[in-house]
Image: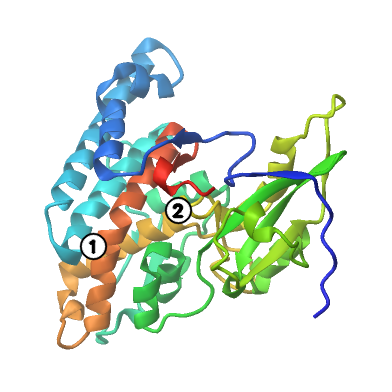
Amino acid sequence: MNLPEHRHFDSWVISAVHDSNNPPDMWTERASVPLILENLRRHAEIASVGRGKFPGTLAQKNKLWLEYRNYMRQALSNFQAALGVPNRSSCLLYYYAMLNFAKAELLTVRPSDVQGAVHHGLSFSPGRQGKSVAGDSLKVRRGVFPWLYEHRTGHALPIGTELPIRRLVPHIPQVGTQSNDVGWGGEKAKGFHHVLVMDSVQSWPVILLPHSAIPTGVTGKIFERHFEQVEKFANWQDVFAISRRLTRFTVHQSRKTVPHASNGSPDLAGALGLTWQMRDILDVRDDAFFDGTLCPSFYSTRLFPMPPSLARYAVTYYASSLVRYKPSVFDFQLFPEQALLFDAIARECALPMLVDTISALEGRAQLFADADTLRV
């Protein structure tokens, strides 16, 4: 296939993908459970942090602050307890931690809904006779999950929507190998590299995708609406700051550009905004190697955003239900792939779920990278 030549540029800057109108917090250290738990405790114990989230009179703020800090304390206690439980059994405690974190998050946007008795917003019937989890689905009910979905994505999630487990799990980047082992293919959330380039008059974003990550279906249509594949430029590995040992990548430049300011300064926020126009299929990076995450639509024929944070939440709810009602599906003699998959979910999703939580409660992305992991 003959690809169009790329626009020529003079300089560039590597840029993590995020909402250009809401800059992230940048951490010069790795994400870790102790670090994030300590910062979440600020929300539970420091009035200026927790109470400052709420509008109204001091009495109104104090009333909500009372609920908020106790949701946070309950969540932190459950999460701390889960760390001491081996394998997938910890998912029960992790889920109740995430449920209380979610209530604290939603208390700032729909306080009347989340105080008192509240439904999970998901349901699962464990009565099927089959032992494979491949045919299981969650059903959306009125409650926490659809409220959380709408708050984080900006899209309503209709009550009664079915969420097949075999579609949800591939949206969790941390368990890709285990997802393959149980035979759940299809498009998956994958990291990509991202730079903002410029010539003398304009700037634009350029994306580097692993060859296997080129999106298809409705995700591909959205991507192609904003970006076009072009020939690799000669120094593409230097521009994206990756090893010359890595070769199977494709280069995509944005179809639009943004002009420099009148004083000649590049409009980097505007160029970043061209990428963020695809926010329905994007998420911030999961590690320092990549600059963003491409998140395919939950269905290939219609747009249904499913960022990893919500997939992790829903699958953890499902795992907590299996732990309670169908533990036999984790029998290592009969279903080793399933057992290893849900052990991995418990092990690998704990830290990312904490990052999801602190990002939501701080109201902006939290990007972690210590000096040893920064690309040069």
Q: Quadrant of residue 91?
A: bottom left
4 or 144, which lies in front? 4
86 or 97, which lies in front? 86
Instruction: Specify whether residue 143 is in view.
Output: no
Which is more foreground, mark 1 or mark 2? 2
- Along the horizontal axis of the image, is 357 left or right of 350? right
Callout count? 2
Q: Identify residue type, mark 1.
A: Ser
Q: In which quarter of the image is residue 296?
A: bottom right
Give the labeled residue for mark 1.
320
| Label 1, residues with CA under 10 Å away: few <14, some 14-19, many ≥20 | many
142 or 323, which lies in front? 323
- Along the horizontal axis of the image, is 154 left or right of 169? right
Q: Which label number is shown at residue 104?
A: none
Q: Identify residue type, mark 2.
A: Asp
Work out whether 243 lies above or below 374: below
Name the residue at 46% across, 41% down.
367
- Along the horizontal axis of the image, is 261 left or right of 194? right
- Between marks 1 and 2, how big is the CA–CA gap? 24 Å
> Which corner quadrant holds the N terminus?
bottom right
Name the residue at 52% across, 78% down.
186
Horizontal and vertical percent for residue 343?
A: 23, 68
Name the residue at 42% across, 36% down.
28
For label 1, the SS is helix
Give the labeled residue for mark 2.
286
Horizontal and vertical percent for residue 315?
A: 34, 63
- Along the horizontal axis of the image, is 9 left or right of 345? right
